[in-house]
Image (cartoon, rainbow, N blue to C red):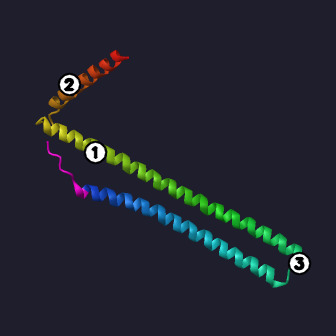
Amino acid sequence: MNDVFDYGEYESLMDEYDDLLCNEEDEKDIYEKKVSEINEYWDRENEYIKSSGIYTKEEVEQILDNHNQIRNEKIAEVKKDYEEALDWIREQKQWAAEQRQWEREDRELDRQLASLDADDGDDRAYRAHRDELAAYDDYIASLDMADD
C-alpha cells in the first residue's frame, strides 16, 4: 500500500482555511470600523447640537434622544450585516470540510482499489472485498451482542 502524503494538497487546504479565517477577521475589522464611523458621526452631530446655542435645553434633549435612537438603529443594521457575513463564512467552512471529507473518502477508495489490483472500471474485486469486510463487521457485532 502506498501511503504518500500530498503536501501540496495539504497546503492548499490550509490556505483555504486561512483565507476563511482571515475573512472572519476582515469582517470583524469592517464591522468595528463601521460602528466607529457611526459613533464618530453622531458624536459630532450631538456636539454641534449641544454647542450651537440655537436650541432650548428641552429641544437639545429631544434631538439627542432622536440621534441616539438613529445611532442604535444604524449599529443594529451593521451588526446584522456582520452576523450574516459570519454565517456565510461558516457555511463556506462547513462546505469546505465536507468537500475535504469526500476527497479523503475518494482517496481511500482509490487506495483500496489499488491494493486489490483493480482499476476504476473493474469494481468486482472491490465489491467482493467490501462484502467480506461487511460480513466480518456483522460477525464482530454478533459477538458484541452475545456478550450483553
Q: Which mark is residue 104?
A: 1
| Front-lying residue, 134 or 110 | 134
Residue 104 position (above or below residue 123):
below
Disc 3: which residue: 56
Q: Which residues are magenta?
A: 1-8
Question: Which corner quadrant holds the N terminus?
Answer: top left
Q: Is residue 94 left or right of residue 111?
A: right
Amino acid at dot 1? Arg
- How many C-alpha atoms fall within 10 Å of the one at disc 2: few (<14), some, or many (≥20)? few
Residue 119 percent coordinates (x, y): 13, 38
Amino acid at dot 2? Glu
Residue 64 magenta-highlighted = no
Quarter of the image where one finds residue 36:
bottom right
Q: Is residue 71 left or right of residue 116?
A: right
| Front-lying residue, 44 or 138 | 138
Q: Is residue 78 left or right of residue 22?
A: right
